[in-house]
Image: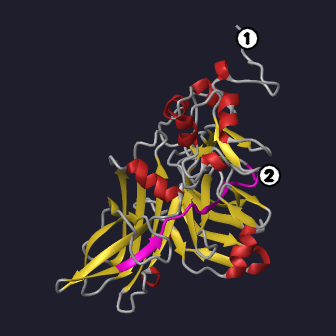
């Protein structure tokens, strides 16, 4: 979730991580596949802002020897320990590699006439991803993972503020930056780490030479940059940790984890002499802040507002800075985080802020039941100012 309340992990509102994720292994097949090859996988799923499509990222690693992968998909409805779906079966088809020998990744945008039904099953925790293999006409489920709204942690990674400025030979000040996410599975047993670096010259960290998660007394996790797709020739990828050490997970949840990125910038002086500057980006891994998303290349506040039935002025009012100069990979609010008070319901929230249930569902794609909101639960709202009421029930906009 984007917030941790007490010791429980509860999914609240959308934040900078993907909406859903799945850790896939052979031992999650029901019953476990004793003859399956060595293969593990990971997936993230993000609902489009207008709920018209689903963005799916998949990665597999390992070796499925002698067997050919013949299909993959999102299946349901089915609980985590359920052998087969109780009704529908295949909800959406997914891409897959015919053969797996090493690492494979893919991204796809899915649309379907039955997408609304699939999203309902996903919110209820009743879907899973599975890859099916074949040999000699015999089919078997190779790897599988339940889709869940995992916990999100985030880090905006900067240089130490006391470090001297870096200015290249062209007079351009270089301010290396990266953004990190850590996903924790619903069962609090698996981790996935993503580090993203901006491409623009002024903020690029250049050559990333080392990445580490420092969990304090619980230890550290050192990650080879290529395992995160941080080379110029690579696409970003997740470092996935299946069955993570319980001590590391406890330290993460307790707020003791830090993300460290060591980099080296290759520069040229005004005199034409090549030199390099090494440094470190660092930040705590904190629970993801509700109702924020990362700015992507060429994204604008107008786009963010339009996608969520809002407007750019409302989005800008939630954030700092120039509305026309947003830098990629900066987290920005797309809606107001709103904490449910005792006695409040979705109906009363909609009435007070002049919203429709469709708009509220778009802003909160992972909330299983908006009709049963719990006190202290955080949801995302975008008021319709012309219909918004004050705490006393009077319109805030008087004609």
Label 1 to label 2, Cα distance in Å?
50 Å
Q: Position of residue 352 (x, y in %)?
A: 71, 29
Give whichever of discs 1 and 2 has the lower sequence position: 2
Q: Which is more foreground, mark 1 or mark 2? A: 1
Residue at screen point 52% across, 48% down:
272
Q: Is mark 1 on a helix, strand or loop?
A: loop
The mark total stands at 2
Q: In this view, does 366 lie to the left or right of 142?
A: right
Identify residue for label 2. Answer: 162
The answer to whether 307 is drawn above or below residue 153 in the figure is above
**Pointer 1 and pointer 2: residues touching (CB < 8 Å)?**
no
Residue at screen point 80% across, 63% down:
6
Residue placed farthest to the right in the image?
A: 392
Q: In which quarter of the image is residue 17?
A: bottom right
Residue 160 circle label: none
The answer to whether 350 is drawn above or below residue 136 in the figure is above
Please tell me whether residue 152 belongs to the stretch shown in magenta: yes
The answer to whether 119 is drawn above or below residue 322 in the figure is below
Residue 398 circle label: 1
Task: Please say whether residue 56 is visible from this viewpoint.
Answer: yes
Residue at screen point 23% across, 81% down:
134
Q: In which quarter of the image is residue 286?
A: bottom right
Residue numbers of the magenta segment: 142-164
Comparing 175 with 272, the one in front is: 175
Q: What element carries label 2?
A: loop
């Amino acid at each position: 979730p984007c917030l941790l309340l007490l010791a429980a992990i509860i999914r609240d509102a959308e934040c900078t991580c993907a909406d859903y994720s799945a850790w896939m292994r052979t031992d999650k097949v029901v019953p476990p596949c004793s003859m399956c090859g060595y293969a593990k996988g990971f997936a993230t799923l993000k609902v489009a802002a207008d709920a018209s499509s689903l963005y799916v990222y998949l990665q597999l690693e390992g070796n499925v020897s002698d067997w050919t992968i013949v299909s993959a998909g999102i299946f349901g409805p089915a609980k985590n320990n359920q052998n087969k779906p109780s009704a529908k079966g295949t909800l959406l088809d997914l891409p897959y590699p015919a053969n797996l020998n090493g690492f494979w990744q893919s991204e796809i945008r899915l649309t379907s006439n039955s997408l609304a039904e699939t999203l309902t099953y996903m919110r209820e925790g009743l879907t899973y991803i599975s890859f099916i293999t074949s040999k000699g006409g015999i089919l078997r489920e190779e790897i599988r993972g339940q889709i869940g709204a995992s916990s999100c942690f985030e880090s905006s990674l900067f240089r130490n503020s006391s470090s001297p400025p870096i200015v290249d030979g062209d007079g351009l000040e270089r301010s290396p930056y990266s953004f990190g996410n850590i996903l924790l599975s619903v069962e609090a047993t698996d981790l996935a780490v993503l580090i993203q670096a901006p491409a623009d010259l002024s903020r690029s960290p250049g050559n990333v030479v080392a990445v580490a998660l420092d969990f304090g007394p619980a230890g550290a996790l050192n990650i080879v940059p290529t395992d995160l797709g941080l080379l110029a020739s690579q696409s970003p990828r997740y470092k996935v940790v299946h069955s993570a050490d319980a001590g590391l997970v406890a330290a993460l949840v307790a707020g003791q984890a830090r993300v460290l990125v060591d980099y080296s910038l290759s520069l040229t002086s005004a005199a034409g002499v090549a030199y390099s500057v090494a440094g470190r980006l660092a930040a705590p891994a904190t629970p993801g802040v509700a109702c924020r998303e990362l700015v992507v290349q060429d994204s604008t506040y107008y786009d963010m507002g339009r996608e969520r039935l809002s407007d750019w002025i409302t989005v800008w009012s939630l954030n700092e800075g120039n509305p026309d100069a947003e830098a990629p990979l900066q987290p920005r609010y797309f809606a107001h985080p709103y904490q449910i008070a005792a006695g409040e319901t979705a109906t009363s929230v909609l009435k007070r802020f002049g919203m429709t249930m469709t708009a509220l569902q778009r802003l909160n794609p992972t909330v299983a039941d908006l009709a049963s909101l719990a006190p202290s639960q955080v949801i995302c709202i975008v008021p319709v100012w012309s219909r918004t009421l004050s705490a006393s029930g009077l319109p805030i906009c008087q004609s």
